[in-house]
Image (cartoon, rainbow, N blue to C red):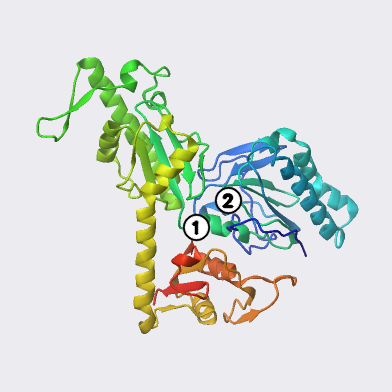
Amino acid sequence: MRAGLHEDVGRAWGTIIRAGTSCANATVRPAFEPIATVRVERYAGHIMTNLQALGYSNLLPEAGAVEPPCLSLYQPTHRHYPHTQQNVIRFRNLVRALETSLREKYATKDVRALLEPFHRLADDSAFWIHQRDGLAVLATSAIFRLYRLQRPVPELAIVADTFHTKPLLRILQSADLFHVLALSGAQMRLFEGNRDSVDEVEIGDAVPTTIGDVTGDREPKPSDVAVTVSAGASGGAAIYQGGGEQDKARADTERFFRAVDDAVLRHYSRPSGLPLILAALPQHHATFRRISRNPGLIDEGISINPDVLTLETLRERAWQAVEPNYLGRLAALREEFRAGQPKDLASDDLERVAEAAVMGRVGTLIIESEREVPGRIDAATGRVALAELAQPDVDDTLDDLAEMVLNAGGRVVVVPAARMPSTTGVAAIYRF
């Protein structure tokens, strides 16, 4: 059953729990355990998190089966007053839509229990003060998860036997996502962004954020923060000036950088596959790049103290650094697609791609970001039956395709229409 309030909210990006997973088979992580590198907070005894681009598989639930109904709520949100006042109003409207759907099948007392955490959230004025660009809620009688999003999502309120996770899929698979590592000799911060926005990541306890986390010295000394360097006579390796204190400071800084590099790689870069942009003073660029083992660290960086940059300036500088990398990756995908077409190793025909996806042939699926093709895909044959999106159990076939490819171990890349190698909204590169 679906009750939706729709409006044009700009880009709709789209998963969290495995899309299409039956609630009866879905599972939940132990309460308040961090989900990979996502910071988890308590909210009314439930789990609240900021969705980071961790990769599809890292957001699968674990342990402890739950039962339907599965409630999925999505809405765009505003960051700034006075538009923030609309956030809770929209939320209450969507909760009423959930209630209408629930009452068609469930007893009043069950409906009241399912919606109680939604009502508590609506009444929490402090929660609504600080929002991003979108909000998602996935809930059953056993779980209640909030996800704050960097991009707007369409308003949806859905009650079904499965979680509706499609609107989040395109957030995770968008090709323009990146991380920024803001680094000094004494502390680090991590940001996640795209061409439109950037936000600081709430770092988990497993990642050192200050030099004291590594050395055990909780109060940084002046020598931890500034180390004087000058170029060698030939312009080669840097020559460090100073005696024993500065030697220790230099060693501690390198130790801190190694710990940061390892933690960011293990907890962020490797799970997400995102490019990493370094924002730091030039001398810290030299040191960090020498010791880094992160294959996602791109050559282009931001050579300035990141603490002096506003978020908007950081976004602009980061996008300037990552855009050539972004365009290069898309150009390579287009070329691979075009080279594969004459050999039957690529296709932009929806039905043929669906058939190939069922067989596990699709290695890379490229989807147009704002295109929808309503219908159903037969999971056994790949046959596509087009239909109206307003009909029950009808969804976007492009999103269904993406789920099939991801579940088979392929990758999905979501790009704007201008960057697509085809005009059909889909382009697939086959494994065989």
**Residue that appears at 35% across and 54% down:** 324
**Residue that appears at 48% across and 62% down:** 415
* Residue 266 visible at all: no
Mark 1, Cα crowd under 10 Å, few <14 / some 14-19 / many 20+, is: many
Q: From the viewer's perspective, is 295 left or right of 267?
A: left
Point out residue 402 in the picture as x, y percentages from the top left corner.
54, 67
Q: Marks 2 and 1, how far apart in space?
A: 11 Å
**Would you name the residue on which mark 1 appears?**
174
Q: Amino acid at mark 1?
A: Ser
Q: On the image, which quarter does residue 242 sit in?
A: top left
Mark 2, Cα crowd under 10 Å, few <14 / some 14-19 / many 20+, is: many
Point out residue 376 in the picture as x, y percentages from the top left corner.
64, 76
**Would you name the residue on which mark 2 appears?**
151
Q: Is residue 354 above or below residue 100?
A: below
Q: Nearer the viewer, residue 143 or 346?
A: 346
Marks 2/1 in contact by CB < 8 Å: the verdict is: yes
Q: Amino acid at mark 2?
A: Arg
**Residue that appears at 38% across and 67% down:** 333
